[in-house]
Structure formats: structure tokens, C-alpha cells
Image: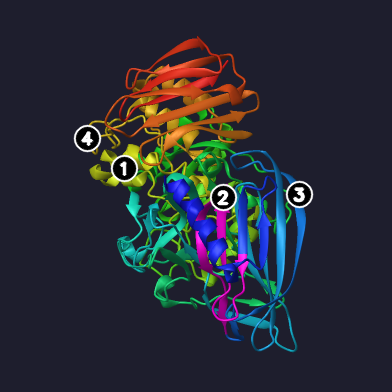
Amino acid sequence: MKKMRSICILMFMVAFFPALAQDATVTGPDGKLKVDLFFPKKGEVNYTVTYDGFSMLSNSALGLETNLGRYGKRDKLLGQNIDKVEDTYTMDRIKTSLVHYKANRLVCDIQTEDGRNWQLEFQVSNNDVAFRYLLPKEGETGSVRVMREKTAFHFPSETTTFLCPQSDAMIGWKRTKPSYEEYYKADAPMNIRSEYGHGYTFPCLFHVGENGWVLVSETGVDSKYCASRLSDCQFDTYTLEFPMQEENNGNGTSEPAFALPGATPWRTLTIGTTLKPIVETTVAWDVVKPLYSTENKYKFGKGTWSWILWQDKSINYDDQVKFVDLASAMGYSYVLVDNFWDTEIGRDRIVDLINYAKSKHVDVFLWYSSSGYWNDIVQGPVNCMDNSIIRKQEMRWLHSIGVKGIKVDFFGGDKQETMRLYEQILSDADDNGLMVIFHGCTMPRGWERMYPNYVGSEAVRASENLVFNQSDCDIEAFNACLHPFIRNTLGSMEFGGCFMNHQLRKDNKKGNTRRTTDIFQLATTILFQNPIQNFALAPNNLEDAPKICMDFLKEVPTVWDETVFLDGYPGKYVVLARRNGNTWYVGGINATAEPLKLKLDLSPLHVMKVKHFEGGNNPETKSVKVKDTYLVTINPNDGIVLVSE
């Protein structure tokens, strides 16, 4: 009935309000996804989005307010051009290794009331919309400052939301927020205020009643702009918001600026009647390009990480040797040495540790604080990464001693100043053959394609919170059933999970209790995508964890050639299939209170036989012949894993 009502409304508007006829239109290649643009003589330039004839966004404003003037109100459409975009590219660190991107591109030439020219560019594929603003260089003016972006998203009133609130700035532990680590609410109405009143961090998922789903985000953010978020909702409408002035301890402007000619980052929408396009989208990478080439060959894989269970006291030489030995026993490529290594192990001894790790065929990642002047962090090393002179010296030293990567933590917000720091760290690191993980940070925005040595960001309420809070353990399954649909679908996610300890402390006898099963934990290694996975294993797991689990954790890959959504609903359950080479891995988990019986369509995988992992905390495997469909049961807080044979 809702779909029929939407059709009737659209027909009524066309029939009785001819003045609303669009001035420009672009559709996806298959014709289902459509964007209409309107340039009213009085009022704001705006757009609508429909999919298969049903309204997804209506009358949503476009425009910029800048130091040069306003763009987007009572502006005149001078001309338009539509052409086709086709791109085939390979990636080695996202959900798929080969992407064929096809879209139709609309470029509108526009003039403001006072005679300034600008352009709107839309690229529309079958399920994705990406758009941005382009400003030319006119006269002697060589730069522009953007005070506000008018971009809006007006949803049908029946829409519900899956959103993560933006926190206050300069709160939390050691005044390190915002860091994209707040709690999601699932299927919430649009008209409720966000927890802190600052709107929501990207990406943002919307369920448009029976019409389908919309995922809103942005991509292509680099040193030339700030990162953005969505406002609280007013009259079913969200607007784009710039960072809060208080971020970064007040350092830097909240208003981005760029040279002319120039463009804003891309605003993106992924749209479908089902969740399949949401989970499988590649839009974050489709519309960006590499910012620099590299001569380095980066190796992705798994690592061990003492800090997650053994915490700060483990950052000593002897304990790190134990985790090097664990990595070696598991066949892992890396060990991550966390904060305080510079004082608790020392720079001379860290060289000894690196040499020992090399003798065991294990390489080292080292932790750094991002700065020392926008929070109260004392964990070292500090004051290295935010100073270009010291940073370059430090990275040359890291290269000379054989370090393969760094993990940089505790960034201060989303201002352009911080985006510039991310880019500087990545660029200098690549000059020295170093991969980079970001922690306590913003969400990546196309960075896997833009920066060849970028290997993941946290930007999620990650595994450390399970160690800190029993309440996080109690809702682990709920949160895990959100990430494949929202945060992780648009960027690599450095979660640091997969616990085999049932008590989340060093001795596995006290501490927070894990509510999820061993098979659930195995399933998350498939569901959570990041090319470098530092798992939450401990040396005792070689003896006390089920051999079935440890053998699986030796074999499961961290890079994928293909991802297929099989079933699920955000916050309730999810089943994904990922392919590495010729082998398919299927992971499924259940966050509901009842056993879940599913009929999985495995026909896209073309598999005939699988090894089925099940049994909760008493895991077992069975070899099963399968046809196009396969019946499975997943218990609450439990999971399943299938591996093609």
C-alpha cells in the first residue's frame, strides 16, 4: 500500500504541478535509479532521488555559502552535459579485487544571481549516486573558503534510521573524542534528537519503509577539505555539517578552504530495494583516484597484539617475545607492539626485538600517538607524528631498523587540519616503506584507493571496549550485526577482535565474560574486513582454545577477491560470503533471542561442497554437499562458518 501511495503522489505532482518539472535528469545505466534537479527562480537549487519509481529523497537542497558569495539560491542553469563513465580497476585491500564501474555523468553549468559560474557533477550507477560541487577560477581570486554546505537529504516520513551519534568534542578518556565510537540505535525514528545534539557520523543508514534502503556518506576527503557529518533531523531532513570548532582543542578552522579551480569531496548515496547493494557497494573507491604511486610492495596478513588482553603491563621485552612466538606458531606475518614501547622497552632494545622477530619470520608494527597538543595523552611515543621534521626523521629510523608499519592513535577531530595530518603521515610513511593503521580516528573516505600504504582505521566501537565494559560484551552480537551494513561496507575497519579467551583478561579466569561463542568469533574474521587483522589471541590459546578454531585462524585470509551478501538485517543477523582465490568463506551470526533458521541461496558461489563449522563453544566440523540452497540454524549469540572444499 505504501508503494502504491508513493506512485499516486508522484503522479499527482506531475499532473497538477507542472512548474515542478525537472530542469535536469540523470539515471543509472539500467534506468532504475534516477536523480532530478530543479532550479527554481525563487528558492534553492534542489534534487530528488527515486529508485524503480519510488521516492527515496525529495526536494533536498544543494549549494554552498562561501567568502565569495552564495551558490545555489535563485541560480540559473546555463547548460548541461551527460556522458558515460566506465572504469575498471584492481584493489588489494577492500571487499573485492576487481571492480567494473559504469555510470552516467551529468555536469550542470550554473550561474549565480550576481554572475559567478559553478558546476554540479553527478555520477549515477545502478545503485549509487555520487555528487560534488566544482568552482572555477575567475579573475584574480585564487582560493575559496566554504562557511557552510547546504547539501540536504529529505527522506519520506516513514523512514527509520541506523545512526551513530557524533560526540561532544574534547570529552572522554584524556579528552580524546570525537572518535566515531558511540553506540548505534537501530530502526530509530528520524524525529529524535541525537545523544549529544551534534548529529551523526558517517556512514548513515536509512530504511525507507517498503521502498528500500539508503546509505549516505562521503568519499575523496583529503588535505583539501574537512570531513563532514549529518545534522540532527528537522522536518524529515538532514543537512551536511562541518566539524565543531572545539575539535582539536580549538586548533584550526572548522571551515574548509581550497585553491581555485577546485572541488568539494563527493557526497554519496547507495540505494536499493534490498540490503544487497548496500553491503556490496564500491562507491567509496569508484569515484576517487590514487594520489600517489608507490615503489613499495606491501604485504597484508594477520598479527598478534598483546595489549588487547594483557594491557599496558605487557609492553616489555619478555612479554613481546611471547607474542612474537605466538605469531610464529600461528604462521602470522606481524606483531603489533603498542603504547609506551619507547620507554618500557626502549629504542635500543626494540631493535633487538625486531631482530628476534625477523628470526621467527615475523615483522613488527609500532604504535604512536598522533600528537601531543590536542588532548591529554601521555602514552608514548608522543610529539612525533604531528611535527614534519621529527616525523620524517622517525620514519627514516623505522625503515632502517626493519619496521613494516605503524599504528597512529588519538586524532583530534575532522577539521581540514586533521585531514592534512592523515595525508602527511601516509605520504611520509610510504616514502619509507611503512604501512599505516589509524586508531582513535575518523572513518576512511576512499583512502584504500587514494593512498597505497593505508591499511585500515578503527572509527568504530572496537574490541577494547569488550575488555573495558561488561555491558559491551552483553551487546557484542548486536553491534557485530551492524558493522557489515554500515561502517565496514564503506571502508576497512580495524576492529582487533576474535577472542578465544572466555574471560577477557590475561589469565582467562576473571574479567569481563564473553557472551558470544567461539564459532561466532570465527565468523567475525569473515564478516569484518581489514587487510591487516591483529587478532585478540593470547599465548594460552595455543593450549586452551579448541584446535578446530586455532587451525581455522591459521588459514583464514585477510584479503578478498569478492563479497556477496546472503542474508541479514542490521542489528539482528548477518550472513556474508567472501572469496579468496578459489575458496569461499561464509560467516553468519545471530543477535536475536531465538534460534534463526535460514535458507541460504549459495548459487552465486557455485560451490558443491563445504566444510561447516558449528557447535558454539564445542565446535565441530562436517563436510556437506550443497546445491543452490542450504538450510542452516544459528543460535542466539552464536554463528556458523562455511568453507568451500
Which residue is denoted by mark 3 in the rendering?
A: 86
Label 2 residue SS: loop
Q: Quadrant of residue 269?
A: bottom right
Amino acid, disc 4: Lys
- Seen from the viewer's position, the closer of residues 347 and 612 is 612
Amino acid, disc 3: Glu
Q: Earlier in the sequence, mark 1 or mark 2?
A: 2
Which residue is denoted by mark 4 in the rendering?
A: 510
Label 1 residue SS: helix
Residue 471 percent coordinates (x, y): 24, 44
Which residue is denoted by mark 1 in the rendering?
A: 466
Magenta region: 37-66
Q: Quadrant of residue 99?
A: top right
Near mark 3 (Cα within 10 A), the count class, few <14, some 14-19 or many ≥20, is few
Question: How many angstroms separate mark 4 from mark 1 (CA)?
Answer: 13 Å
Question: How many angstroms separate mark 2 from mark 3 (CA)?
Answer: 25 Å
Viewer-side label of 2, 3:
2
In reply to whether residue 364 is colored magenta, the answer given is no
Whether residues under marks 1 and 2 lie with C-beta atoms below 8 angstroms apart, the answer is no
